[in-house]
Image (cartoon, rainbow, N blue to C red):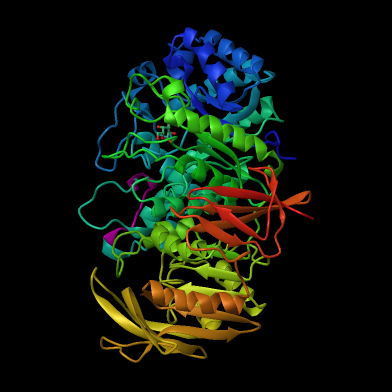
Amino acid sequence: MTPRLPPKLLYGGDYNPEQWPESVWLEDVRLMRAAGVNIVSLGIFSWARLQPSEKRFDFGWLDRVMDLLAKNGISVCLATATASPPPWLTRKYPGVLPVTADGVTLQVGSRQQYSPSSPVYKKFAAALVRKLAQRYRRHSALASWHINNEYACHLPECHNADSTRAFRAWLRAKYRTLAALNDAWGTAFWSQAYGDWAEIFTPRRAPYHCNPTQCLDFKRFTSDAFLALYRMEAAILRAATPAIPLTTNFMGFFKPLDYRAWAPEIDYVAWDSYPDPVDEAAARHAGAVGHDLMRSLKPGRPFVLMEQAPSAVNWRSVNLPKRPGIMRLQSLQTVARGGDGVMFFQWRASKAGAEKFHSGLLPHVPPKQSRVFAEVTALGAELKKLTPVAGSLVRNRVAIAFDWHAWWAVELESKPGRIDYAAWAQSLHRWFYQKNIGVDFVHPGAELAGYDLVVAPALYLLTKQAAANLTAFTARGGTLLATYFSGIVDEHEHIVLGGYPALLRQALGLWVEEWAPYPDGRTNGVRLGGRKFTCDHWCDLLHLEGAKPLATYTGDFFAGRPAVTRHRHGRGTAYYLGTRLDAAGLDALLLRVTKTAGVKAPLRAPAGVEITRRDAKRGQFLFALNHTGRPARISLGKYRGTNLLTGRSTARTLTLAPLDAAVIQLKR
Ligand code: GLA
C-alpha cells in the first residue's frame, strides 16, 4: 500500500524558521493556529544551517521547531534540504558546480548550484538525508517527506565533466554499440559518425544546428539524471520510514522533466502554481489546466498544491498583488479540480534575501492590520468545513494526449514552423474548461478505455505502440481528434515514411502531402458547415482516403482543398484538424466533436462560472465558482444538497455573488 497523507484538506506553507530568532517561533505557531494552518513544509533551504561544515551537523534548532509544531498540532512535510548546497561544499569541491551549454560555470550565492550528475553532490546529499531520516523517523509531527525542491527549476541542464561522463554512460546503456547510436542519431548526415564513446559530448554550443536526436537524448538523459537523484533520496527515506508518504514539488507544464516517468515514484503529486494576476482570466485557466495535468499524473489520488502565492510574487518585472477574493477562489479551484491541499510560499514573508518582497501568509505588517492575513484566516476556516471532500476524486471522459517526448522533439530546432506544444494543448483545453467539460491528460500509449474523446494536439513524435493504441481506441468506438503535425517522427526523431502521418493514416483516412506553416499575422480562411472562419499558423495539404471533408480552405494555392475532416473508423470516429481555427471556428468544430463523443458538462452555467464534480463512495460534491464580477444564477437541475461553505440546503437555483463559490455535498 502506498503511504497516504492524513484524510483532511492540508493548509499551510513553506516555513523557514531559520531566518528568524527563536523568539519569533512562538508567535509563528500561535498565528498558524489562528489561521487554521495544519501543516508546514520545513527546512527546504536549511542545508547550511543543518551542516555548517563538512564534519559538523546541528539539528538542535530543528528538534526544537519540530517539537514546537508537534505540541501545537501542526504536521510537518519535512524537506530533505538538498536543494541548495552550502558554500563550503562547492568551495572544497568546485567540480559540483553546473556548467551551461556555453561553458559558463554557475557559481555559489544563489541556489541549486549543483550538477545532477555529480557523485560528490550525491554523496553529501545522501549523507544528510540519512541523518534526517534517522533523527526524525519517529517524530510525531512528521506527516510527509518533501524531497529536494523544484528539481531543475533554475538548472534545466548541465554540461560539466560529471554530466558529460554520465551522458556517455546513459548512452552506452541505451544503445550498447556505437553502431546503434550512429544509426539512431543519423550521424551519416554532416560527417558526424562517432568512432569512440569519448568523442561524444553533451550538446554544447556549436556552430550551427545540433544533431536533433543527440539533443532529444540529452533531454531524456537530463530528466533521468534528476530522477535518479530523487530515487536516491527516496530509497533512503523509504527504508527508514516506510509508512510516511514521499513527494517532491512539480511545476505544472515544466518542460525539462518528464513528470510522467516520475509519477510512479512519488506517493502523491505536489505542485507549485504561480499564475500572473495581471490577467485574471488567463490566470484562472492557467491554474485549471495545471491542476488537470498534475492530477492526471496519479489518477486515483488527490494532489496537493504545495506552493502558491498568497498575493504578489517577487520574480516578475512587475508583481501585482492578488486583489481581495482571488486567493480564496484560486484555492477553492484547487480543491474543485482534485486537490486535497492548499499550501503557499511562504508562511512568514522574509526580512532579508532575494525573496523579501514575495508575499507571505504573514506579511511584514502587523497581522491584525493585514488584508492578506484576514483572507488567510478566513480561508483556513472554510477549508475545515470542506473536510468531507478529502479523498474524493475527479473523473473525466475527455483526455488530451500529452507526451513530454513529443514536446521535446517538436520544439527542437530546424522544423517547418514553430509549434509551442504546451500552448497548443492548453488552447484546446481552454475550450473544454470554458464549457465545464472535465479533461485529463494522458500518455498516448496509455489505457484509454475510460474515455469517450481523446484530443491529440501536434503529437509530432509518436511510437508505433502509441499510434496503434489511438487507432484501436477509435476502432472500439472512441472519438479521436488529431491535429496537424502529429505522427511525423518515431522515437529516434526519424520521419516515418509512407505519407504523413503514416502510423495514423488508417484511423484518420487521409494523408498529408505538404504543409504551409504561416508567419505571424498571415491568415487563410475555411468554410465549415456553411460558415466562414479564419485560420492561421499552419495549413496541412491533405489527400483523403476515406475521410470526409468538413471544412475547406478558401485561400492560398490550395483553396478548395480539405482543412478539417471526419472519418468513420471501426465503431468510432476520427477527426483531423489540419490548421489552427479562430475561436468561433474551433467552437463550431468542438461542439460537433463533443456531440459525436457524447460528452457534456455536468450542468449549464453562465460564462465565467466554473463547475466541477468530485466523487467518492461516501458522497459526491459539486463545485461552482463564480469568477466574474457579476452575481451568477445557476440552475442546479437534478443536483440538490448542502452547501458546505454556508451549511445551508440548496434550492433549485443557486445565486453566487461576484467571486463567490459553493461546494455542494449532493444528496444521495
Ligand atoms: C518556488 C520555490 C520557492 C520560492 C517560490 C517563490 O516555487 O520553490 O522556494 O522561491 O518559488 O515564488
Residue drawn at (57%, 64%) of the image? 437
Q: Residue 479 in the image: state x and y as whole percent.
A: 59, 76
Of the four image quadrants, the one with ligand 1 is: top left
Q: Is residue 151 visible?
A: yes
Is the N terminus in the top left, top right, bottom left or bottom right quadrant? top right
Residue drawn at (67%, 24%) of the image? 240
**Which of 205 and 434 lies nearest the eye of the viewer?**
434
**Which of 414 and 331 lies nearest the eye of the viewer?**
331
**Which of 598 and 445 lies nearest the eye of the viewer?**
598
From which residue to which does the magenta span run? 191-201
Q: Is residue 232 visible?
A: no
**Which of 440 and 36 lies nearest the eye of the viewer?**
36
Residue 49 among those drawn in magenta:
no
Q: Residue 292 in the image: state x and y as whole percent.
A: 54, 53
User: What predominant SS class does the magenta segment belong to?
Assistant: loop
Q: How many marks?
A: 0
Q: Residue 419 in the image: state x and y as whole percent.
A: 35, 64
Is the C terminus in the top left, top right, bottom left or bottom right quadrant? bottom right
Tell me: residue 171, above or below residue 153.
Answer: below
